[in-house]
Image (cartoon, helix red, strand yellow):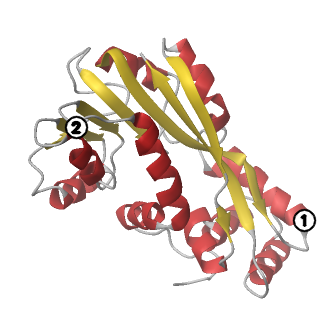
Amino acid sequence: MSTTLGASRPDPAAYMLRTAASPAGRGYKQELMELLDIQPGQIALDVGCGPGTDLPTLAERVGASGTVIGVDRDPAMLAEARRRTSDLPAVQIREADAHALPVEPGTVDRAKIDRVLMHVAEPTGVPAQLHLATQPGARIALAEPDWDTLVVDAEDLDTSRAFTRYTTSEAVRHATIGRSLARHAEQAGFVVETVRATTPVFLDFQDADHTLGLGRNMHQAIQDGHIDEARGRRWFTSLSEGPFFASFTLVTVICSR
């Protein structure tokens, strides 16, 4: 893997699959699935399903009598999702935006949206769509990072802080959505049952560079004039030369309808 400042953005599908398979990804996803309490025969909706990362797990839980609907707006992601679930008859793949879900109102038993709201045009509108799609007694799971909590250990603490500020203000569309999930869910008409905060820890520089975009985001921060080039390059180089630590907080909210 490249550790060059400004390394190209990874293939989106490969990035999502690798992140989900990492120890941090497996941990919170397993807890999310358990809290969602999916039962055989139910209709489960995965909004922003990407390359189908979680669709096989959902299909296993709803069983042969259930249905899993994976929704995404990216044709390339959907193509990979179809490939990965071609042998799972319970899974349906539908192309649509999270702001206009392609399901009959009041039909969904379980729904999840995982690390998607930070990218959508209007994150407050998506929980309202989920409320419309779900039936009374349904349960939904929302999971998003709060990038204000991103910390990267370095002797140059000021540059680490500048990197987090750039990530929050420029690199991610809705960087602090994680802290707002419970509020948005309640405003959409859901009852919040559980709020969990998970802190993935990265001790391997290359793993963190891939997941957190250290090199590519620092490169862009320099290009955009937010961080001095010499300072940014020294900071990035120093991260790979000794013991490494980075972390951020991810919030999971479980709600009922």
Q: Using a 10 Å C-alpha cutoff, classify the residue at mark 2 as few (fewer than 14 neighbours), some (14 to 19) or many (20 or more).
A: many
Please, what secondary structure does the residue beneath circle 1 have? Answer: helix
Image quadrant occupied by the C terminus: top left
SS for tag 2?
strand
Q: CA distance from mark 1 to mark 2?
A: 45 Å
Q: In percent of the image, x 67 and y 34: which residue is there? A: 179
Q: Is residue 148 above or below residue 231?
A: above
- In the picture, measured across the screen, residue 33 lies left or right of residue 27, that is left
Name the residue rendered at 56%, 76% in the picture: 7
Is residue 114 visible in the rendered structure shown here? no
Residue identifier under label 2: 69
Percent across and percent down for residue 193 are 54, 24
- Residue type at mark 1? Leu
Looking at the rendering, which quadrant does residue 177 occupy? Answer: top right
Question: Can you give x and y, in whole percent of width and height, for residue 45 in the image?
Answer: 29, 34
User: Label 1: how many residues lie within 10 Å, few (<14), some (14-19) or many (20+)?
Assistant: few
Disc 2 marks a residue whose amino acid type is Ile
Which percent across, then down, holds residue 164?
76, 55
- For this view, does 17 lie left or right of residue 92? right
For disc 1, the marked residue is 157
In the displayed structure, would residue 129 be above or below residue 223?
above
Q: Which mark is residue 140?
A: none
Q: How many marks?
A: 2
Q: Is residue 112 above or below residue 127?
A: below
Q: Residue at x 75, y 71 (%)?
A: 245
Q: Is residue 170 left or right of residue 112?
A: right
Q: Residue at x 75, y 77 (%)?
A: 244
Q: Is residue 41 left or right of residue 161?
A: left
Res 126 → quadrant: top left
